[in-house]
Image: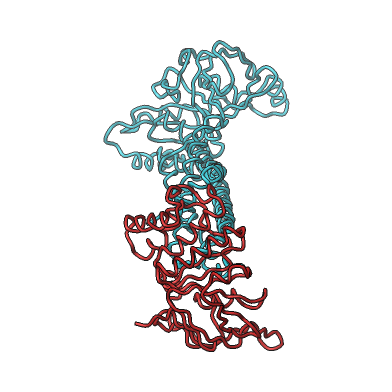
Chain colours: A red, B cyan
Amino acid sequence: MSNQSIKVENLVKRFGKGDNLVSILEGGDFRVDKGELVALVAPSGAGKTTLLMMIGCVEEPTSGKIWLGDEKVYDNKWLTKETRKIRREKIGFIFQAHYLIPFLTILENVTLVSQVNGISKQQAEKEAMELLEYFDIADKAHVKPSQLSGGQNQRVAIARALANKPQIILADEPTAALDSARSVAVVKMLKRIAIDQNVAVIMVTHDDAMLPLCDRILKIEDKKVKNKYI
Amino acid sequence: MINLAQKDISHTFGKFIVTAMGVGMLFGVVLLMIGVYRGMVVEAQGLLKDMDVDIWVVQENTLGPFAESSRVHEDLKDTLRVIKGVDKASAITFQNIQIPLKNRQVRAFAVGYNPYEDISPLNLDRLVSGRDLQKSHYEMVADDKSGLKLHDKVKLGRNIYAVVGITHGAVSSSGDPLVFLSLKDAQELQFLYSNSRIRNDRDRGIVTGASHMVNAIVLTLHNGYSADEISSEIKRFKHKSVYTNKQQESILTKNLVERSSKQIGLFTAILVIVSTIIIALIIYTMTLEKMKEIAIMKLIGIPNSLIVKMIVQETLILGILAFIFGNIFAHLVYSNFPKKVVLLNPDAFVLLVVIVIASILSSFVGVKKVISADPASAIGG
């Protein structure tokens, strides 16, 4: 079994046709291994989020190949109709805002995906409580997101992303809404998760101060994804 | 598994309840409309049921006094009474009258009958004060809906009548209060012209007709005799139109109430359609408010079926809650209506079934929105 978590080959993404054709990405080849925290950087509008969505099986590429773990999921077309199942079982998402479901409690937010994956309520709650304890927020398990601070909610969002035991975490500017101290704490937390949970984390960021905390940088330059080592 | 609908409703409980109450009032109006129709049927058949006769004999080629003008001779009752199988025969008159009451006129339906005969249209169970008619002249029993009180004096035609009894719930097919008069008084009111009219007629050479006419003869039969057979016999030999009580009921409900029922039915259908559209709009708005959460749920892999289930459940709960509120509303206000409103459980059950179907149809707009939601819209940047 390889250590590979994400592998992308010659990924191309274009929008529109003819005169309206807009090219976003013209070739991206990279790999992210388990236990790695990789930063994805690029100027605004360069296609960071689009790349994240293609890896996350949300946006269909124009061409190329994508492997998630050892499974090839895209080869010029999706190799499965169940892209949502792939997301549910293999990927955890973290967003700029926490985007927790406001009508569910913290515990329910964290257990929702696990329960959909067929894990019993008791087991899902037990594992969710362990995660909430890991993030030092177990005492808030039964309150709604509106009763927590932004930082607490972001920790819950990370716990939710981990609840389905993903192989990959895709984080879209998770520190954008936080002050610098909390941003550092979140990125350190992601690094700790990458190692402890043996998952690959790709984090989109604009904050250069976060880059030294990452293992590696992927940069989109001239519509191509390039590896930059710190 | 987490029930998303239950969680969402409890999150916005107050708003949800107020919305359900609003829609519920519409359903309450639907129930009341059906109740108005039921009330019309009950009122239309009330007098028939109170009289509890077997056969109605009326003017030939007419449908009888409830549907059109009918005149037969009073003494017809004597020839009908001797037919084999006939137990009792009585003459009856019906007419609309205006009762002067202080500064206004009250429309009423006068029923004339012979208080000394066995068939009485006055159901004593409805008598709430006073007594039945006991004299041949100048007494009146009136329904409380007319506004008359016991011992009131009322001038009708040439004479003054004393109110000797008050009933409750005795109304005509059109909902007007019933007034009971002796047959002689009722005949005089209906058939006897004023002195000046009689003199005028004489000068013109017209012989004024006798006032010994009535609108119908009603019969009761001995046990074991068929109303249909005796009706056929009377039709054949007496050249009258004859109806059994069931046929008379049918004339009342079909000929008199049918158009109203169609009107009410159409209005009810429009209200149900309007309610369905309102529920659909509410569900659409509620779904729009949750689009971000729905996109997130789709992004993190929650299947459409679970999200669709939430929308459909919320719509159904909204519909059923609205039905409950509608029932409460209808039961609170129905007694204040000027005409009888009858709320029946089977009607409420049918409405519940319609609401469930309407709710499921309404949820389609929300479901369509859920299915078309783009999970990528959850991510900014």
Residue at the image point whose x is 47% and y is 66% from the top? B300
Residue at the image point whose x is 67% and y is 17% from the top? B102
Residue at the image point whose x is 55% and y is 67% from the top? B373
How many numbered callouts? 0
Query: Is residue A187 shown above or below A12?
Result: above
Q: Which of A84 and B231 is in front in this view?
A: A84
Visible in this render: residue A122?
A: yes
Expressed as whole percent of the image width and height from the top left, the position of residue A225 reads 58, 83
Q: In this view, does B27 lie to the left or right of A167?
A: right
Which quarter of the rendering shows the N terminus of chain B? Answer: bottom left
Q: Quadrant of residue B202?
A: top right
Residue situated furthest top in the rendering? B151
Query: Is residue A160 shown above or below B194?
Result: below
Expressed as whole percent of the image width and height from the top left, the position of residue B369 reads 55, 64
Visible in this render: residue B3?
A: no
Q: Which of A90 and A57 is in front in this view?
A: A90
Q: In which quarter of the image is residue B227?
A: top left
Query: Is residue B349 shown above or below A83?
Result: above
Expressed as whole percent of the image width and height from the top left, the position of residue B282 reads 57, 53
Expressed as whole percent of the image width and height from the top left, the position of residue A202 reads 52, 73
